[in-house]
Image: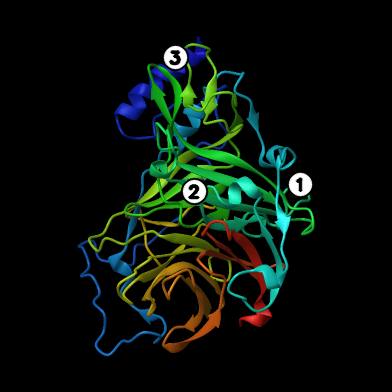
Amino acid sequence: MRAALLIGALVAGCGGGGGDGAPDSGGGDPDAGADAPVVSDDPCPVAPVACPALPAGYALGDGLRAVDRCAFPLTERDTWAVRRAIVDALPAAVRRVTLADVAGDLNRAATRATAAQVPGSPAGVRSAFTWQAGDRDVAYWIPQGVTGSFDGAADGLVAGRRILLVSWYHDRAAEPGATADKGVRIAIVDVTDPAAVRYRFALLVDPVVRDGRSDFDPVAVHSGGLAWVGDHLYVPDTSRGLRVFDLTRIVAVDTTVDALGYDPATGAYHAHGYRYVIPQVDSYDDAGGCSPRFSYVAVDRGASPPALLAGEYDATSIGGRLYRWPLDPATGRLALTDRGRAIATGAWFLGQTHVQGAAARGPVTWLSSSAPAGGGGALYRTTVGQRSTTLPWIDAPEDLAFDGPADVLWSLSEAAPARYVVAVARTAID
């Protein structure tokens, strides 16, 4: 009865488009609303700010060039309570698990690689691996984003393990017979022992109410980057903003059917054959007029306060932009102003093309680029107002993540079958 009443209230809450009045389950969710971010004074005008143009004389390789940060506000949809309650109203048979539980239930083995095997020959390879055979060459799942427990946990560990998370997006057109876009899967990878790397996939889902019960929709985004902050996983949504997923509400579902969500014939829930799903709980949307793109994202723990570093892929010009949005350290959510906006602490033109990922340590920013075209790659080391330095990098590169405790920069390549994940010593690229 309680579940039925809850779902009814959720339908009303979702129909109204807001999460503030949504009920929680089980007598009250102690973290629904308790983690609201601290609000600060808004430093930017209320009226839209003119979109910055490339400055005269600014050329390829000229380094980061600051632009008006006020041109790129984000607004929070504030669906934390609604979406959490939808997940919490799932039947008891849909078992809730922890990330540590998933890390203890890995079912695939990676293959360790030597520095000489990594295509592109980046300098300073500390460790590397490639996926097992079926994942190295699958055409319809493509790896993109990377983050790790060095970003997400205070001690850099999950139950004593060093964990990477790697996003893969589904290309429906490349899967023969596919009847649906399966969205995004996340590889949970145990890299504690570089000689014995194991992993398992979990599917990202968007909790919805359908026919009066909790259900799932796919998360059909490119997932070009990942940022793990405490209990939250941030995923870029290219034309819209950032989606947030809850790592405390992972649930286990039936694995026997290649379908998503509730099955009325059996009463079971499915996730295209994957055992675990990670639900979305909120999103931050572009609220300006300059149409920023959200191609990749990383955690910048060297910023004060810690921040999300997000940027744009641009294959035709050096006008792709980079943004740094501050986090509330107490909650892991974006810091909001008194106008309910997230305002970047900085924004820059990149001065490079084909940028697939960015990471920072102090004043140094690294950019991974798939230019020149044809499968090669480059790593640009840059700072504000200084020429970039070009370094050899992994072929067909994607996202970047800086592992402070280990002092390495992680990256990965997407082109099948040469799909590698590498950790490069900071001393070799700084």
Q: Residues within 10 Å of mark 3 (few under 14, many from 20)?
A: few
Q: Residue at x 37, y 62 (%)?
A: 343
Q: Give residue 139's mark.
A: 2
Tag nearer the camera, 3 or 2 = 2
Percent across and percent down for residue 363 are 53, 80
- Quadrant (top left, top right, bottom left, bottom right) of the C terminus: bottom right
Q: Is residue 69 left or right of residue 157?
A: left
Q: Position of residue 198 (x, y in %)?
A: 72, 48
Dot 1: element: loop
Q: Which circle's residue, 1 or 3, is located before the other in the chain? A: 3
Identify the residue position indicated by label 1 in the image. Answer: 159
Q: CA distance from mark 1 to mark 3?
A: 37 Å
Circle 3 residue: 5
Secondary structure category for the residue under label 3: helix
Q: Which mark is residue 313?
A: none
Q: Residue at x 45, y 33 (%)?
A: 83
Task: Give the CA distance from mark 1 to mark 2.
Answer: 34 Å
Classify 10 Å Cα crowding around label 2: few (below 14), some (14-19), many (20 and above). Answer: some
Q: Amino acid at mark 1?
A: Ala
Q: Which element carries disc 2, helix, strand or loop?
A: loop
